[in-house]
Amino acid sequence: MAPRGVAIPDVRERLFAAAERVLAREGPAGLTNRSVTEEADCAKGLLYRHFADLDDFVAQLVLDRFERVAAQVGPLAARAGEGDVRDNLAGAALAMLGANGPAIAAAAVSRHRVAERVGRAWAGGAPGPGTVEEAMARYLRAEQRLGRIAADADCPMLALALAGTVHHLLMHGGPGTDGTAALVRRLVAALVPDAPGAAPA
């Protein structure tokens, strides 16, 4: 355990990472101040020095992870023309799920005040599922302009369908890491039409 009075670098991330491990192992019911701080190997009072309460901690965890996803997916349109369109989209979708995304989402929806806080933050402009959807739509339009997606494809609707399905998997879980990846790739293949004359994916 960190000695009393010694600052812990990146304490928020240390606590967030510890919470993800607890959630993956024990589910939302196992997430407590004590379980997080013990997993992080730090004093029990540390969490409450950085967060108002456990609900605030979980809400900030959700918002932090979506901010990371948005930062990862946001530049996707700038990479139009590179790699395989479907692989790029599947990668963006899987980034939204993350390694522990369903477990974090389960913790959020199991705590009413967390869901409210996260919803208010997203309504106020914090990166969320809508941010990812918009990034996917920009990317699809960019690839469409390059002729790598069919000219008559409805890019905003494709992005909505993909992001909406991934959000469903995020909230309700999926068939496991490998199965979810295969499912997402199958979904992308079914949704995204080839441009006429394009090589098969």
Image (tube, rainbow, N blue to C red):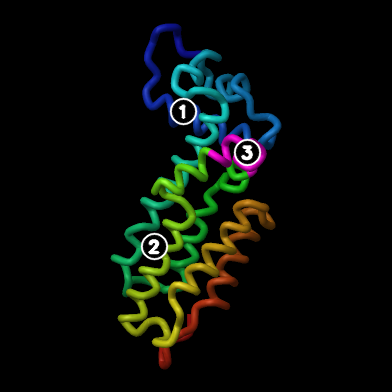
Q: Which residues are magenta?
A: 106-116
Q: Residue at x 49, y 73 (%)?
A: 158
Q: The residue under label 3 is which amino acid type?
A: Ala
Q: Which mark is residue 107?
A: 3
Q: Residue 46's spot in the image, x, y percent?
A: 49, 16
Callout 2 environment at 10 Å: few (<14), some (14 to 19), or many (20+)? many
Q: Rounded to the nearest whole Å, what is the CA distance between mark 2 and mark 3?
A: 26 Å
Q: Nearer the viewer, residue 171 or 193?
A: 171
Q: Is residue 131 above or below residue 105?
A: below
Q: Is label 2 in a helix, a strand or a loop?
A: helix
Q: Main secondary structure of the magenta part?
A: helix
Residue located 41% across and 69% down the image: 137
Q: Secondary structure at mark 3?
A: helix
Dot 1 corresponds to which residue? 14
Label 3 neighbour load within 10 Å: few <14, some 14-19, many 20+: many
Give the percent coordinates (x, y) of residue 6.
38, 10
Question: Is residue 179 found left or right of 151 in the rendered image?
Answer: right
Q: First in sequence: mark 1 or mark 3?
A: 1
Which residue, given by chain and number where applicable, does mark 2 sit on? 135
